[in-house]
Amino acid sequence: MQFGVVSLFPDMVGTIGEFGVVGRAQQRGLILLATENPRDHTDDAHRTVDDRPYGGGPGMVMKFQPVADALQAAKSRLPAACPVVYLSPQGRVFDQAMAKRFSALPGLLLLAGRYEGIDERLLESHIDEEVSLGDFVLSGGEIAAMAVIDAVVRLLPGVLGDDESALQDSFMQGLLDHPHYTRPEEIAGRRVPDVLLSGDHAEIAKWRLQQALGRSFLRRPDLLEKLDLDDGQRRLLDEFLKEQSQ
Ligand code: 4FM
């Protein structure tokens, strides 16, 4: 899969390809990451990419032309029909389902803005989808673009090993993950739950599902409401809540 990112800080975006899962995916040729800087699409001596907002007020707005030209240049080096995604708090909230949808595409072109925003006419003429990581304000879209790329890359075939890909299951099922433990068995009087030491893999799987259901109910009831629990899951959750209340 090919990713393009239009950003005034291309070196920042490039660092995602240096580490961990995404780094390995890039080394192995499973993804291509290319950046395009609007500043390289200016023709004045100061290489101006921003201007004052019409109507006044504080801050600056990204100029139409350098961003439009950078998007065009990035597009020309990506597969045809790559959607252009703008990262901003005004967008639809990113989730695992959106990551999965993006992961089926041949490529994705992400626009990371800076300053107070981009000229609205860019949204109308050049942007297919506006996406938000959540209800908070970053200093620019780069970290959001990097988060989207990271979440998408881990879903691409062959990127995660067999061990790692099992880890996807919990959130992929729409639930929070279960608790994790490693050695030693006891830390300051806190013991690893007995079931995890039992070697009974069916019981362990049941306990993990129960923990995932219970934590989702307590911390993220919105996630559980989207699911249609079967009788077995319902019973596990009821049992969790009964034990919780004792
Ligand atoms: C976006 C700053 C555009 C400047 C931002 C411009 C954000 C978020 C975010 C800040 N992006 N989810 N939340 N961006 O805060 O995606 Cl021009």
Image: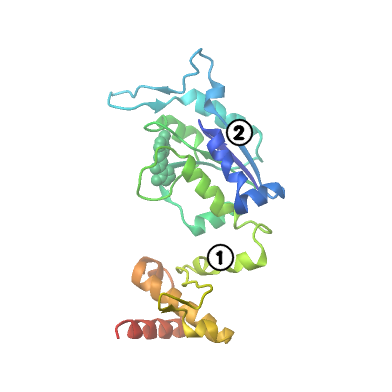
Badge 1, how many Cα within 10 Å: few under 14, some, many 20+?
A: some
The disc placed on residue 236 is: none
Q: Which residue is mark 2?
A: 74
**Amino acid type indicated by mark 2:** Ala
- Disc 2 under 8 Å from ligand 1? The reply is no
Residue at image location 50% in from the left, 59% down from the top: 96
Sequence-wise first label, 2 or 1: 2
- Disc 1 under 8 Å from ligand 1? The reply is no
Q: Which residue is mark 1?
A: 168
In the rendered image, the quadrant that contains the C terminus is: bottom left
Relative to 78, 9 lies left or right: left
Viewer-nearest residue: 235 or 168: 168
Q: Is residue 246 above or below residue 91?
A: below
Q: Is residue 165 above or below residue 30?
A: below
Relative to 115, 126 lies left or right: right
Relative to 150, 174 lies left or right: left
CB atoms of marks 2 and 1 within 8 Å: no
Instruction: Give the image location of residue 86, x and y in percent.
Output: 47, 40
Dot 2 falls on a residue whose secondary structure is helix
